[in-house]
Image (spheres, coloured by chain):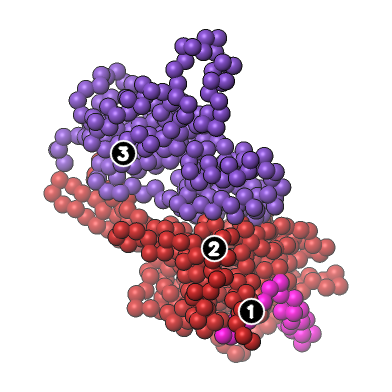
Amino acid sequence: MATDHVSVTIEKQGLQSLIDILAKRGYRVVGPTLRDQAIVYDDIARVDELPAGWTDEQDGGTYRLQRRDDGALFGYTVGPHSWKRFLHPPIQQLWKAARSADAATVEATPAEPERFALFGVRACELHAIAIQDKVFLHGPYVDSHYKARRDNAFIVAVNCGKAGGTCFCVSMNTGPRVSNGYDLALTELVEGGKHRFVVEAGSDKGRDVLAGLPKQPASSGDLDAAKKVTEKTAASMGRSMKADDVRELLARNLEHKRWDEVAERCLSCANCTMVCPTCFCVSVEEASDLAGVESSRSRRWDSCFTMDYSYVHGGSVRSTTRARYRQWMTHKLSTWWDQFGTSGCVGCGRCITWCPVGIDITEEVAAIRSSEPQ
Amino acid sequence: MAAKKPRLAVWKFASCDGCQLSLLDCEDELLAVAGAVDIAYFPEATRGEISGKYDVSLVEGSVTTAHDAERILDVRARSRVVITIGACATAGGIQALKNFADVKEFTAAVYAHPEYIHTLATSTAISAHIKVDFELRGCPINKMQLVEVVSAFVAGRKPVTPAHSVCIECKLKNNVCVMVAHAKPCLGPVTHAGCGALCPSYDRGCYGCFGPMETPNTVSLSRQMAHLGMSRADLKRVYSTFNVNAEEFRKERERHG
């Protein structure tokens, strides 16, 4: 990231100009909007499609929208969707094949050139994208589908003005202030009847877009106010997890009785893995037509909570829910380090909120920790 | 490719015909189905006598009479592959509610001459009577899954009909969870996928039409649904539908009185 970053302020209308410029440059702008009593990520064309004056209350297994007493556009935390839906979509065809009388042809499905502008990406989510970059781009095999979407993406980040009930980014050192990985970063200031956004550019692409916006230079007072926004958020996290030694803690507690206790509650429904912004696992499925002429192979989001996931000849390796929950949590917090050199958890809290029975990863870690001599 | 087309038969036992109709409802795919297999016996759609052997039999319905308990043995003997379709055939259907009641009392209440009614005390899945090669879940079945099963049979591969929860289908579809966000009781977490998360897509909780998923934790889900306001009677009722006789749902039903 360039250190000589530009900081300016824009008005609410400036955000509309930003959306317009991005759309004009050929981006499909996707951002937070209201649907089905939740704040989801979907296509947006106008600022008034953002959830103005709404916030969310989150706890284990529960998510409720509430009104705010101001018109903040980003006064909530992360919802049921994550950006992986756009960069690593739920279903992706890989190739198709056709048979004629004397030949068979196989054709790889080309990477889609879709250009996403991800509008309203939080700090934890930038870290999640960086983790998926490692998985899909930085290993020995580069995933062409992910790469095409990722290379083309424009990221408008937002510094969080509110911590959610299940947020613990401070523990995971992933927020609430963005540090890098964005093209533009916004901090929303709603005070004294004024509604403005401090904007910082984090890339050349970002600076280029910023140049076209109606803006004012940010004063030192504006920058102070922006800093205070995230300081306040950091001080009000809904959850926390002592994370500095969790890798070793779990590795030495693989036979802990807590795994039996959590398995008694766990539905093995896979919701936690579906909503997790770093979970990347897929299943590969074949389809063939009735005439036996055409077939195709697709990948689809899968989960380590399904029996098929660990199926090898003769049966599933992880046949119990205890084994599957332990696999998920130890991978996320412990063996992810061995595999990718980072934690697989960014502290977004989605797995807690969207677990139908409210299983809380921070509580599970704390329970295992508390049983050890301090 | 010029090989002889496999002979297909469609059989009906105790059922509403809805699953067989899914085959006719295929419309766009029906010509392809007819092109891929020889539909040799399908009374719902065409005239045709039972004759000889069939490469694949689709069986709808449950066994509720002594006559049907005999007839299913004949179906097995005539069929290379038996595929049961729908909740009646795979679990006993809604009519399996009689397994928990006094059938004599029912027939006396319903029929003027109950002495003419010859019925078993239970409604049972086809697999309780014969070896079944593949079970396709649902009340009714999903027609695209039926086409998938027939396509897989023709190609000699395993059908793609995952046994995981309905929740995964919701997430693939972008649905907001009705249980977490709207506090609606939902059987999705314990129910076998296949419907494409139909009810949650219309803001309703899942009714469990596809029966238990591969590893259902009904006890934990019931605890949460009680927390959301369901009474013991409500909980008993949600498991007492089309798949009431599927083992995991039956046991959970029994826990609630």
What's drawn in magenta, residue-wise?
A: A216-245
Taking the magenta stretch, the answer to whether it contains residue A218 is: yes
User: Could you tell me which residue is drawn at 24 percent across and 46 percent down?
Assistant: B156
Q: Quadrant of residue A314?
A: bottom left
Q: Distance of mark 3 from mark 2, alpha carbons? A: 33 Å
Taking the magenta stretch, the answer to whether it contains residue A12 is: no
Query: Does residue A143 lie above or below A269 as drawn?
Result: below
**Element under disc 3:** loop
Residue A345 location (% of width, % of height): 55, 74
Residue B110 location (% of width, % of height): 57, 16
Q: With B179 as the anchor, is A13 left or right in this view?
A: right
Work out whether disc 1 and disc 3 sit on a shared chain: no
Q: Please report contact status of discs 1 and 3: CB closer than 8 Å, yes or no.
A: no
Label for residue A263?
A: 2
The three-letter code of the residue at mark 2 reads: Ala
- Which residue is disc 1 drawn over? A370
The three-letter code of the residue at mark 1 reads: Ser
Query: Does residue B17 lie above or below A323 as drawn?
Result: above
User: Could you tell me which residue is drawn at 45 percent across and 51 percent down?
Assistant: B214
Q: Quadrant of residue B109?
A: top right
**Element under disc 2:** helix
Query: Does residue B157 lie above or below A92 as drawn?
Result: above
Q: Nearer the viewer, residue B84 or A280?
A: B84
| Residue A18 at least partly seen | no
Label for residue B131?
A: 3
Q: With B245 as the anchor, is A291 left or right in this view?
A: left
Q: Which residue reaches farthest right?
A: A192
Q: Which chain is red?
A: A
